[in-house]
């Protein structure tokens, strides 16, 4: 099943899901090939019983996996777009967060606040549906993946569990957006938010934004301040000249008359 967003971007993204058996807790991960020529692997769980334990473990940062509250996800394409953006930002050294895992969660959120984004998109003690995302081959025995007590189901099942009302409210999606033409306007709206999200730290560091790499035409505050001072200084000099003329009792017109 593909959405209109997926159909429009299919040729450019080259995202192909491949089932991959993993020795880590027996999870079945699907591989997604990204435009940046790297892959991610995802596994979907339902009816999770140990979310609180997983959430506590993730705080230590010991795991090699990103765990997403799947209530915020419509389809794997949504995660792939956010992951591709995170990998590109890492390569260009313009990430908004300190790690690739948190950069992915931040990109999936519609908030510009990092802490709020991680709390909203990441696993919580009450999460019942989880999406595990890995940036390296899950067949590696060195990976640290927490055990998930729940049902590991195919990624294609994601769209069947979507709560449109919840997502529309959480991501501020209007009724008008949901009525736009296309196979999946909800997915389109979410992907557009990921693509258009501003990268403030990247703009500060490099003078460009990641989408389209448009160079910033804004001057640094120090230069603007110096220009204002220069203009003020010139204005003050003009006023002093006028004052001098007034004190001498002359101006341009009177001096002309005297010469005549």
Image (cartoon, grey):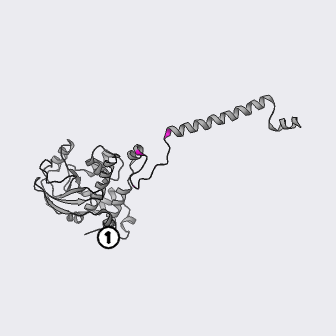
Q: Residue furthest front?
A: 37
> Magenta span: helix, strand or loop, mainly?
loop
State the residue position of label 1: 183
For the point 65% across and 36% down, which residue is it? 234
Judge whether residue 241 is colored magenta: no
Residue span colored magenta: 206-221
Number of residues whose C-alpha sits closer than 10 Å to that of mark 1, classed few (under 14), some (14–19) or many (20 or more): some
**Image: 193 above or below 216:** below
**Image: 202 above or below 195:** above
- Left or right of 11, for residue 19: left
On the rendered image, what quadrant is the C terminus found in?
top right
For the point 41% across and 45% down, which residue is it? 206
Which percent across, then down, holds residue 111?
35, 50
- Badge 1 marks a residue whose secondary structure is loop
Q: Nearer the viewer, residue 177 or 135?
A: 135
Q: Nearer the viewer, residue 81 or 74?
A: 81
């Amino acid at each position: 099943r593909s959405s209109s967003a997926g159909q429009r971007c299919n040729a450019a993204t080259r995202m192909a899901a491949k089932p991959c058996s993993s020795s880590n807790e027996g999870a079945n991960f699907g591989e997604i090939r990204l435009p940046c020529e790297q892959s991610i692997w995802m596994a979907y769980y339902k009816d999770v019983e140990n979310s609180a334990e997983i959430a506590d473990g993730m705080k230590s940062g010991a795991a090699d996996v990103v765990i997403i509250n799947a209530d915020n996800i419509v389809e794997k394409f949504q995660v792939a777009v956010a992951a591709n953006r995170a990998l590109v930002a890492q390569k260009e050294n313009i990430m908004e967060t300190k790690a690739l895992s948190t950069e992915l969660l931040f990109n999936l959120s519609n908030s510009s606040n990092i802490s709020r984004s991680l709390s909203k998109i990441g696993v919580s003690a009450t999460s019942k549906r989880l999406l595990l995302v890995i940036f390296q081959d899950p067949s590696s025995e060195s990976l640290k993946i927490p055990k998930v007590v729940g049902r590991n189901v195919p990624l294609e099942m994601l769209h069947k569990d979507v709560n449109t009302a919840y997502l529309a409210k959480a991501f501020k999606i209007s009724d008008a957006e949901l009525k736009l033409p296309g196979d999946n306007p909800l997915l389109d709206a979410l992907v557009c938010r990921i693509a258009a999200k501003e990268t403030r730290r990247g703009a500060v560091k490099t003078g460009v934004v990641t989408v389209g790499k448009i160079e910033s035409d804004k001057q640094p505050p120090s230069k603007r301040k110096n220009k204002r001072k220069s203009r003020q200084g010139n204005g003050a000099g003009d006023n002093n000249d006028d004052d001098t003329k007034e004190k001498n009792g002359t101006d341009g017109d009177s001096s002309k008359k005297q010469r005549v």
